[in-house]
Image: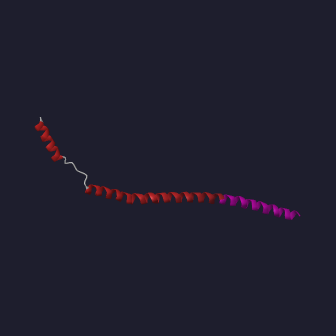
Amino acid sequence: MSDKTELLEEIDVVLVPRRKLDINYFIFTLLTLTFIAVFAFPKVYISQQIYYESRDIAKLKREYDTLKEENRLISASVESIKFKNQILDTLF
């Protein structure tokens, strides 16, 4: 039995060599993570900046629409006052 297990262990060593974690593997992994970070972080930063700018634009658009509506109401009020003023001027 021991000859069989010994033979299987030797075959396992030959067919499936165990890769030890050496310095080259560590450097390769570190470079890969750095490469991913170099491309991922700017995208996240740019996406955040676009989000904040679009939020500011939406706020300004909302304020613009409000001011435009107020301008319309004030213009209507001015026209009403002008109309009343013209009628009152003609009566007196």
Whether 69 is among the magenta residues is: yes
Determine which quarter of the picture holds residue 61.
bottom right
**Looking at the image, which is closer to me, 71 or 49?**
49
Quadrant position of the C terminus in the picture: bottom right
Is 55 left, or right, of 41 in this rendering?
Answer: right
Locate residue 70, reporting x and y percent: 69, 58
Color encoding of the figure = secondary structure
Kindly give the residue lying farthest to the left in the view shown: 3
Locate residue 75, reporting x and y percent: 72, 61
Kindly give the residue lying farthest to the right in the view shown: 92
Quadrant position of the N terminus in the picture: top left
Kindly give the residue lying farthest to the top in the view shown: 1
Is 82 left, or right, of 63 in this rendering?
Answer: right
Residue name at image x 73 percent, y 59 percent: 76
Residue name at image x 14 percent, y 44 percent: 10
Which segment did they paint magenta? Answer: 67-92
Determine which quarter of the picture holds residue 81.
bottom right
Residue name at image x 27 percent, y 55 percent: 25
Determine which quarter of the picture holds residue 37.
bottom left
Locate residue 46, reporting x and y percent: 46, 60
**Looking at the image, which is closer to me, 40 or 19?**
19
Whether 46 is among the magenta residues is: no
Residue name at image x 85 percent, y 65 percent: 89
Is 57 left, or right, of 80 in this rendering?
Answer: left
Count of numbered tags: 0
